[in-house]
Image (cartoon, rainbow, N blue to C red):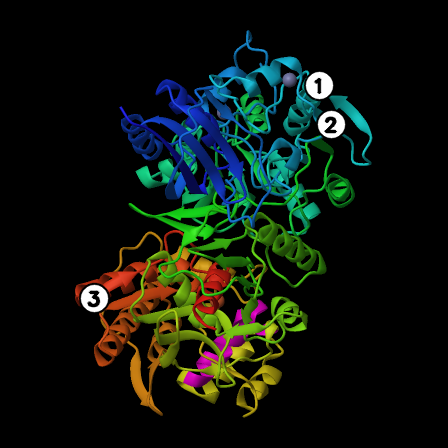
Amino acid sequence: MAVERRRLRVTGTVQGVGFRPFVYRLAVELGLAGSVANDSRGVTIEVEGPAEDLDELQRRLLAEAPPLARIATVDVAAMEPTGIRGGFTIVDSRAEGAPAVAVSVDVATCEECQAELVDPTDRRFGYPFVNCTNCGPRYTIILSIPYDRAATTMAVFPMCDDCRKEYEDPANRRFHAEPNACPVCGPHLSLLGPDGELRAERGGALAGAVAALDAGQVVGVKGLGGYHLAVDAAQPGAVAELRRRKARDDKPFALMVPDVPAATALCRLTPAAEEALTSPRRPIVLAPRLRSGTQPGLPGAEVDERVAPGLPELGLMLPYTPLHHLLMAQARRPLVMTSGNLSDEPIAHEDDDARQRLGPMVDVLLTHNRAIHIRCDDSVVRTREATTQMVRRSRGYAPEPIPLVRPARRQVLAVGAELKNTVSVAKGHNVIASHHIGDLEHLAAYRSFLQAVEHLCGLTGVVPEVVAHDLHPEYLSTKFAVDGDLPTFGVQHHHAHIASCLVEHAREAPVLGVAFDGLGMGTDGTVWGGEFLVADLDSFERVGHLRTVPLAGGNMAIREPWRMALAWTHAALGREAAERYGRATDERWPTVLAMIERPDTILTSSAGRLFDAVAALCGLRDRVTYEAQAAIQLEAACARLATSDAPGWDVDVDRVGGLTVLDASPLVTRVVAERDRGAPVPEIAAGFHDGLGRGVADTAVALAAEHGLDTVALSGGVFQNARLTEVVARRVAEAGLRVLVHRLLPPNDGAISVGQAAIAARAG
Ligand code: ZN
Ligand code: ZN
Ligand code: FE
């Protein structure tokens, strides 16, 4: 039988996922000679043996790859056989060439490691840093590539003999598990007081933290991508105290629950929700809350109302690090686990910084000496009947590449928007989006943004040839791009929204894009946010929009929805009705009304602000303490009502200067009339949602027909609203068109950098 030698270059997510040990075992089983190595592009295999066995190796490489591996390409080259039958080896990493490799995401503790954690005879019994090639920290501990222990924050822990043996034994689950550790050689826990004084170590630290939780105290916990603040979710005093110390009024807190039964005692979980909850990515899952007391006697069925004030959903997650498993096994009830920061600042992840910033907020700090190199917040998904929608794509998802249909013509750095910022790079056939960075209004967040840019470029080896940015000149991300030395490429905000949706659906042909969000800089001197675009990845044309109203007071209009209610009342019903509303609402109304009537006040077509206005008109909220709070409460108000075609909830459609204008005034008029006659708020909220949804769908269908398009794409933060999305998507589909909605990426500004990167990668 002919002996051949081949070189296989494998690209994709193949480092840090147990790929080399897998290749080793396969080659040994097939009796092949050669070697496998990580390199800067992925994994290179050189292998020699009978042609049939080589074919078999290639087949099984794809069929049996480890669960976390994602093979993108395998290039095979024939080589001269050497005749050497010296077995198969794993060779050291080489740092040659420009890195193009995808680094693995952080992965929740696997079942085998969980079993060791609770086995009294195992040498890692109760050890909070157990991991293997199938689980553990990756993205958050890697300093540079190739991925090797020396290039992680584990480099400072030399392995003991036992760990080293596992690491070097090809038959072992920890063969080349870079963060491998045990109680003898690895990191350990410490419990610190608020001033950083050491209170206990190892098992004593864990026990001390659990005792503090029992006593209703605030405990800082160092996690995978940053610190959490934890309290017992059932103790009202503890939850209230956490809100006070964090300076966070109403924004909901996430909960960590011990297991699935504890989750189902709190929320109604669809199969999709349960799948997301238990997946190795372990996001926070938003699910409808069961009314308290419906399942008496179940442990953990009660959580304090202040965990998620006024909302019908709770955010739940399961333990995802060994430390969480140990903590939850002792606490045995839901814990609030919210990011360790003062309201709106980035999550703390560096130890000195955490001691400084969190010290004043905590009673004790449960920490350890394995450094987190890059912060990574928990991801958030919202589940509907059969589907899962991303709300925040971060830990467990970043930096997984998103494929491009056409390869990038140049290497791009895209710096995203202002709120919910992420950054992305495009290179070759991929866009790679960073973790969630947050709102760039604070210096601390901007610093975190700079770190993310450096980390992402370093891990992907991208040397940007162009920096893509938003058109808004005041965004710190825009300023970063414009003030830098590289060529820049401005991308209109709503074009980026639609583009991000096209990327995840691998869509090349133009679509009718509906981009509904808060605010984004337009190209005509108004602030956009309710847009109908004919768009592909190369260009866009605005063909319609929501009727504009004055944005009275810039950022104040976001924080105080009553201002938008005043503007919409004025637009729909005139001055007298606006005066009446103003008098009943806020003493500053004459100033705001004057602003509304001034011709130079900036106009906005924002759909998000329309929702704010209607929420305020319904009496739900005149002021918000976090972005989109009023709109979220408006959706929540009608969560229990089925959608309907109730008559009289209609929009007007006009044609102004060649553009289709969807006028929501009739809806606003009806809202005011229903309020005046004392109709229940849930019915008003439902009528508004369904009426607007029908108007949006009909407008999209008409515009698609006019421009010869067969597909409608929905993007922008307003499409986090499940009811609106459902009404629009169903009606567009009923008209025979295809509907694209987000699945992999959030519809909100977290996806903007992906859209920017994809657009800029095509140009030039
Ligand atoms: Zn494991
Ligand atoms: Zn060890
Ligand atoms: Fe947006």
Is label 2 within 8 A of ligand 2 (CB to nearest ligand atom)?
A: no
Which image quarter holds the N terminus? Answer: top left
Which residue shows up at 52% across the image and 32% down it?
320
Which residue shows up at 45% across the image and 27% down it?
34
Q: Nearer the viewer, mark 1 or mark 3?
A: 3
Which of these two is toward me, 373 or 77? 77
The boundaries of the magenta stretch are: 556-571
Name the residue that disc number 2 marks.
191
Which residue shows up at 39% across the image and 30% down it?
295
566 in magenta:
yes
Mark 1 lies on a secondary structure that is helix
- 1 or 2: tag closer to the N-terminus: 2
Above or below, 161 relative to 175: above
- 1 or 3: tag closer to the N-terminus: 1
- 3 or 2: tag closer to the N-terminus: 2
Q: In which image quadrant can residue 330 be found?
A: top right
Mark 3 lies on a secondary structure that is loop
* Residue 30 point in image, percent of width and height: 35, 21
Name the residue that disc number 3 marks.
737
Q: Is residue 380 something one can see in this rendering?
A: yes
Q: In which image quadrant can residue 742 be found?
A: bottom left
* Residue 208 point in image, percent of width and height: 70, 23
* Residue 226 point in image, percent of width and height: 63, 41
Side of 107 relative to 704 (left or right): right
105 in magenta:
no
Give, as a three-letter code, the residue at label 2.
Answer: Leu
What separation in Å lies between label 1 and label 2 (alpha carbons)?
8 Å
Name the residue that disc number 1 marks.
204
Are dots 1 and 2 in contact, CB under 8 Å?
yes
What separation in Å lies between label 3 and label 2 (alpha carbons)?
58 Å
Give, as a three-letter code, the residue at label 3.
Answer: Leu
